[in-house]
C-alpha cells in the first residue's frame, strides 16, 4: 500500500488506496479566467485568497496554484500566489507550472512538502524537474507523455510512467513520491477512453505501486451535461484505484460523488463524513445548513 | 466475452460486458406495497400494467415480476401478472418467486426465454429449480448463499457461485445462462462491503465467465440519501464489470448514473444515448422534453 505524503507547515495529507480521496482544487489558475489573470498580473491576490478559502470549505484537501499568464513574470507571481494562499489556508499545495524557473521560485517560498505539478517523460523535463523535486524533498505529478506527445495506446502511457519512476529513482526520489497522471482522453472522440483509463489506473496501483491523479473533466469534452459524466468518471475511477484528482470542489455533484465513492471504497470510516454531509432535515427547521447544525446540537444536548 | 440472451416473443435483450447495462425494473413486487398486494390478490392488474409501462418508458429493458402475497394463490397470480405485463410491453421478463410451483406456473405461461429469479446454492433449491430452467430453456439468477445463509466472506460466496455453475452444467445449462448475484451487504454495517462486491463482480466476469446482477439498494441500508449511494454503487460496479441490476428505473438519479456509466464503459456508441437524454435546451423553448424534440426536428429540417 503506497502512501504519498504532502504537507503544509501544519498539516499533512496522505494519498493512498486506503485513504479518503484527495481533491486537489483546480480553481487558482488564470488560464481561461481573464479577470483573475489581470488581477494576479497587477499584484491583486484578493480573488486568489477567496478561491483558496472557498475550495477548502468545499472539501479540497490540497490546492493547485498556477500562475501561467502570458508575458507576465510567472516565477514572481507564482511565488507570491503561494505566499498569499498559505496566509489564509493550511492545506498542502500543488505548485503548477510548465516553466522550471517558476517551479523553482514556488518551491523556494513554499513552507512544507509540496506536490510539484508536473514532470513529463520528455528528457529535457526529466533532467530539469527531477533534481528540483529531489532537492526540496517534494512529491511530483508525472504526466505520461514524452517528445512524441500523448499516445492513444495505454501501454505506451504505462511504459512512460514506469520510465519516470525509474528516472526519479536515479535522483533518489522514491516511487511513493510520484503521483502518476495517466492522461484522460475525451470519450466523445475515443469511445474506449474510459476503459483505458480505468485499466491504467488499476495497473499503476497494482503493478507500479504508485498513487495517481488526473484532470477528470477532459473525459467529457464536447458532451452535454459534462458535470454528471465527470462525477461518474471519478466514482468509477476511485473504484479502479484512483487516489486523487485535480478538479473543481465547488461543483456540488462532483464533491458528492467523491464522498459516495469514499464510502463504497471503505475509506469513510463508519460513513461518518457521508452522514455528516447528508443528514436529513429535522422537522421544518432543517432547510439550511446552519439550522441542521442547531438541531443536531439540540438533539445531542437533549439525548 | 459471455453473453446472456433473454427474450420476449418479439424482443431480445443481451447481458454482457460489451453491452449497455441491463436495468431490470423491480417495481412489480407486492412486498411492502400493500395497495398493490390487495389489488393483485383481488384480480385487479391495472397498477401492474401501469408500473410495467412506466418502467419501460424510464429505461428498464427487462421487468421483474413478483407475486409474493401471503396466503394468496401465488402461482395463479404470478402467471396472470405475467400475462398482463406481456399484454402491454414487449421487454423480456424476470419471473421472481421463492416458490417452485409459482416459477413453474410463470414459465408455463411466459412467451419467450425468461430469466428465472432465482436459485440459491441450497441443495433442495438446486434440485428443484435447475430442471425447470433446463426444461424451459430459460436463464437463471444464481444467489450466492446456501443452507448456512449468507457468508460475509466473499471467497465463500464466489465458491457458491462456482458450485451453482457446475450443478447447472450437470443439467445442460451453459454458464452463459447463469447470472450471478454476488449479494450486496449494507456498507453501514460492513465497511468493506463495497470493495468486496467490486472484487467479486470482477472475479465473476474474469475467472468464472458469467454475467452478474444485484439488488443494488441493499448497499445503502440505514444511511441518509440512499439514492446517491445506490447511484454511485452502480457506477462503480459497472466499472468492475456488473452487467445488470434489479433496481428502480423511476429514480432519475439511478437511471442517469447508469447512462453515464455506459458511456464510460464504452457501451454507448458515439455517446448517442447520453446525448439524446442530456441534450441542452435550445433558446427559451427548451424547458420541456416535447419542446426540445420540436426544436431538434426544426433544426434538422432547417439544416
Image (spheres, coloured by chain):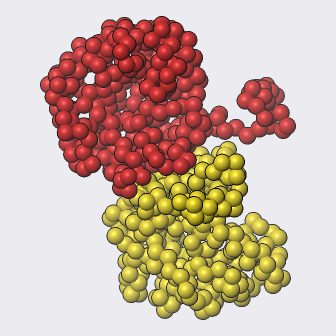
Chain colours: A red, B yellow
The reply to whether residue B92 is in sight is yes
Task: Determine the residue positioned at 43% across, 26% down.
Answer: A31
Instruction: Where is residue B35? Give x, y as percent.
Output: 82, 70
Q: With respect to residue A140, does A39 lie above or below?
A: above
Q: Please state if A141 lies on the left or on the right of A233 as rendered.
A: left
Q: Nearer the viewer, residue A193 or B131?
A: A193
Q: How many marks?
A: 0
Q: With respect to residue A280, does A135 lie above or below?
A: above
The reply to whether residue B200 is in sight is no
Q: With respect to residue A72, does A196 lie above or below?
A: below
Q: Please state if B98 lies on the left or on the right of A193 as rendered.
A: right
Instruction: Where is residue A258? Give x, y as percent.
Output: 52, 39
Q: Residue furthest front?
A: B302
Q: Nearer the viewer, residue A255 or B95?
A: A255
Task: Determine the residue positioned at 14% across, 25% down.
Answer: A170
Query: Within the image, what quadrant is residue A4 found in?
Result: top left
Amino acid at each position: 500500500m503506497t502512501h504519498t505524503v504532502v504537507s503544509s507547515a501544519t498539516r499533512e495529507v496522505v494519498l493512498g488506496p486506503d485513504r479518503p480521496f484527495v481533491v486537489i482544487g483546480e480553481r487558482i489558475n488564470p488560464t481561461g479566467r481573464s479577470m483573475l489573470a489581470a488581477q494576479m498580473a497587477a499584484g491583486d491576490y484578493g480573488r486568489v485568497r477567496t478561491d483558496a478559502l472557498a475550495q477548502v470549505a468545499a472539501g479540497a484537501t490540497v490546492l493547485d496554484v498556477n500562475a501561467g499568464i502570458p508575458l507576465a513574470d510567472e516565477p514572481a507571481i507564482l511565488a507570491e500566489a503561494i505566499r498569499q494562499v498559505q496566509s489564509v489556508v493550511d492545506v498542502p499545495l500543488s505548485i503548477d507550472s510548465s516553466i522550471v524557473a517558476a517551479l523553482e521560485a514556488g518551491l523556494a517560498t513554499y513552507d512544507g512538502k509540496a506536490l510539484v505539478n508536473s514532470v513529463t517523460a520528455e528528457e529535457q523535463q526529466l533532467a530539469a524537474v527531477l533534481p528540483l523535486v529531489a532537492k526540496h524533498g517534494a512529491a511530483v505529478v508525472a504526466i505520461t507523455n514524452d517528445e512524441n506527445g500523448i499516445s492513444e495506446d495505454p501501454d505506451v502511457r504505462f511504459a512512460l510512467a514506469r520510465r519516470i519512476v525509474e528516472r526519479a529513482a536515479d535522483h533518489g526520489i522514491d516511487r511513493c513520491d510520484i503521483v502518476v497522471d495517466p492522461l484522460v482522453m475525451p470519450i466523445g472522440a475515443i469511445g474506449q477512453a474510459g476503459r483505458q483509463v480505468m485499466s491504467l489506473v488499476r495497473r499503476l496501483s497494482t503493478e507500479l505501486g504508485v498513487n495517481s491523479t488526473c484532470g477528470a473533466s477532459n473525459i467529457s469534452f464536447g458532451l452535454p451535461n459534462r458535470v454528471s459524466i465527470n462525477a461518474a468518471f471519478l466514482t468509477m475511477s476511485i473504484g479502479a484505484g484512483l487516489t486523487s484528482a485535480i478538479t473543481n470542489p465547488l461543483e456540488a455533484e462532483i464533491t458528492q460523488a467523491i464522498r459516495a465513492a469514499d464510502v463504497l471504497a471503505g475509506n469513510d470510516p463508519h460513513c461518518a463524513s457521508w452522514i455528516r454531509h447528508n443528514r436529513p432535515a429535522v422537522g421544518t427547521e432543517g432547510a439550511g445548513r446552519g439550522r441542521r447544525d442547531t438541531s443536531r446540537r439540540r438533539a445531542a444536548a437533549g439525548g
